Structure formats: structure tokens, C-alpha cells
Amino acid sequence: MTTKEIFRKIADERMEEFYDYLRLQSVSTQHRQIPETVAYVKKMIEKTGGTVQVLDDLGGHPVVYGSFEAGPNGNSAKTLLFYNHYDVQPEDPIGEWDTDPFEPTVRDGILYARGVADNKANFMVRLNALSALLETEGGLPCNVKFLVEGEEENGSPNLKKYLEKYADLFAADACIWEFGGKDKDERFVIEAGVKGIAYFDVTVESAKVDIHSSMAAVVDNAAWRLVQALATMRTVDNEIVVEGFYDHITPPTALEKEIVSQLPFNEAATKEIYGLTGDLITKGKERTPSEALVFEPTLTISGLLSGYTDPGIKTVLPKSASAKIDCRLVPGQEPEHIYEVLRKHLDDHGFQDVKLELIKGMHAFRSDMTDPFVATVTDSAQKAYGSDTEIVLSPNSAGSGPMYHFYHYLKLPILSSGVGWGNSRAHAPNESVRLADYYQGTEHIAILLNDFAK
């Protein structure tokens, strides 16, 4: 058997086990099947040959710790940590799924299920790689640890406490993050950081009851108050004009700028996949889309609710209105500072009645791009995916995650590697991974472990 055939054989032998993992409806925000999923994650790690501790003494859903020792010919002085999460997003809107979201289904080489891309396939691929190494080499090339949490889709509210208390348990030399994969042009993308986030509830109440809209000649209403308040924060050209919003940003290094200047971005493919009806907001600006995605903070309205929204007519002045605001942050920005400048902005513009609550904050993080682990991950990916696949390295993802806490308590470089693809649709209906990527991902992790151990 060739190496690729062995990796595929191992993955196929554990495929039904993987399907059973996908069938578990581990929706963290609804606390669905969390104990069952924790028990199953524990069982899978133990089946692979690892030892497990379930940590549940600090609140929230349990954190699963898995540990594997280097084999007799391995380097016991080196330890690689894998971060994953077992929780998934809700399956809504259920009517937009082509298959049952919790019944894994393969069509044309694509595996569909809720949580398959985010994040269950990446966890399973790592276990498959360990199984393959144990079968073919009689042991692992280095020590391996897992941290598998159950609240990532809720913003990891309790993970910081577990990392602080159990820092010695999770100590390692480097970490592979939970996400990653190929982009819309089949390039394999490796990211060395994440943006932070400050997420807000914004509410305003203008009356005790909804009012007949004939009173609009003399009575203001909450819906107008809210949209007028939000409109002061960004111009029609999509520039954030909140004083102090850009304070304290850590400027990117020359190396980070050079790397991002070479990042490809396929505008046409982006528009096609998301069905965009207008131009990108970077059009006509000095910054490129790649620069904006990596280096620029954002201020986004994620949702609006007010008044009558059902079919037909109901003429009212809404008594209340609410919105969700999502700010993606870059290194140096503090969620609490963003709250302060937004609050001051509202007050200075006459919107003292608009309530603002910071409900989630998370810091941004970038690994040191000169760390040797960066080359280890990129070189191993090139070996696994071949010369026909372009390997793309980015200083950070445009998304967010608890990466900063890992660095703060464990002091280690962190890079991504996964088996997603340009149409994985994480968090959306018809979430998927391609089986070809799933098999390749197993090979990449095995090669990475061998290279890391040297």
C-alpha cells in the first residue's frame, strides 16, 4: 500500500464512527446533547490510544483534555497541541437544507452535515492521522495534546478560566488551530492569527406602547431613533467615524505587510458564492480587499428588530427598537475601549437614550511570523498537497476566536490547518466538506507531526 492508500484506509475504517459524531446535535447555545457528545469525544480519543481528562469544575460546558506520548523512536521533548471544539451552530433555517442536517449525507464526493466543517471533520482528521502513524510507525513522532471545548460557538466564555488553571496540563511547544482549508481558487490557506470581537446589544424605547402612526406628525419613535443613531457611526462610503475607534492599534510589521501584499483575492468568486448584488466596499479605496480583511477593524449591524414585520399592514409607531452590533478588532484594540468610544459617540450626538451593552469581548492575536513553526506548517502542507496546490500564508483570519487566551497562558505559536473548502458554508444550511480534502487533511497532519518532531 502507498502512504496515501494507508491514510485513506484508516479514514474509511473510522468513517461510521465519524458519522455517529456528526449525528450528535451538540448545539451549545441550546445545550443539546452536550453530555453525550463529551462522552463520545472521550471515547474517540481513548480508542485512538490517548488518555483523557474531562474538566468541568469551572462552569460552562466541559473541556476535554487528551494526551498521547511520543513513541519509542519519537522526540519526547516536543509537544504539539491541537485545539478543537465539539459544539456546533443551530441548524436554522431548517427549510434551506437539502438534507437532514444531523444525518451525514454524501453526494458527489461531498459530505453534508451541521458541524462537519466547523469543526468536527478537523478533529476527526487529526485522530485519523494519529491512528495512521501508530499503525505504520509503531508510535508517534512527538507528544500530542488536545483541548476540545464545547462553547466556541458561544464565544468561549469559560475557556479563559480553564486555560489559566490548567496551563501546565495544556503546555506545549506549538498549537494547530481548529479551522482552515482551501479557498475559492483551491489554494490551501494557513492563518497565523484571528481578529478580536466586541459584540453589543443596542436598544431604545420611546413609549410604553406602540402608537397609531397618525401620531407621527408630533411623536418620534424608537425605530427612527435607532437607525439615526447607528447611521452616525459610519458614512455612506462605509468609513467608521467614531472618535477613538482606531486608538491603540498595533501597526503591522513590515513582514506582515509584505505577506498581505501578496495575498490573492478573487473578487468574482466571492461575489458568486455569496450572491452579492453590489460592489465590494473597498472599491475605490487605497486598501485592497486582502489588506482590509487582515488589517482593518470593522463595525457591522448584525441585526435589527422593531415594530410590525409580518405580512400585510399595521400602521404603528414602534415603542422600542433593538440592534446587534459586531465589531471585529485588530491587535491593540480593547473591547472595553470600543464600548467607551461608542458610548461617548452616542452621547455626543444626542442619543443618551440609546442603551448600549457589551455582551462579548475577545482580543485579536497574531503569531510571530518569523517563528520556525510557521515554516514547519507551510512546508508540511506543500508536501501533503503537492506542487500543484498553492500554499497561502496570512497573518490572521478575518474571523475571531479565543486564540489570544492560548498565547497569554501558554506562550506558543498558533497556526491553522483544516479541511474546509470555498463552499463549506460553515454556520449556514448545507454545511459540507469534500471527502478528497478529508483524506488529504489526514496526510497533512501526519507529515506535520513528523516534521515538527525533528
Image (cartoon, helix red, strand yellow):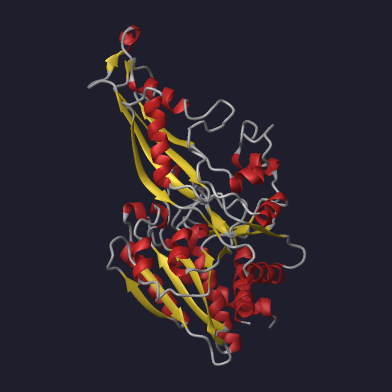
Q: Does the image show residue 163? A: yes
Q: In the image as oriented, which residue stretches furthest toward the front?
A: 248
Q: Quadrant of the N terminus?
A: bottom right
- The picture places residue 160, in percent across and down from the top left corner, at 37, 61
Residue 397, placed above or below residue 138 = above
Q: In the image as oriented, which residue stretches furthest toward the bottom?
A: 72
Of the pair 191 and 251, the residue shown nearer to us: 251
Of the pair 448 and 364, the residue shown nearer to us: 364
Q: Does the image show residue 104? A: no
Horizontal relation, residue 302 to residue 213: left or right:
right
- The picture places residue 97, in percent across and down from the top left corner, at 49, 47
Picture mark count: 0
Horizontal relation, residue 408 to residue 322: left or right:
right
Question: Which image quadrant for residue 93?
Answer: top left
Of the pair 80 and 428, the residue shown nearer to us: 80
**Residue visible at 62% across and 74% down in the picture:** 448
Question: Which image quadrant for residue 285?
Answer: top right
Residue 169, placed above or below residue 291 = below
Q: Quadrant of the C terminus?
A: bottom right
**Residue visible at 47% across and 57% down in the picture:** 115
- The picture places residue 292, in percent across and down from the top left corner, at 62, 43
Residue 322, placed above or below residue 330 = above
- The picture places residue 415, in percent across and down from the top left corner, at 57, 64
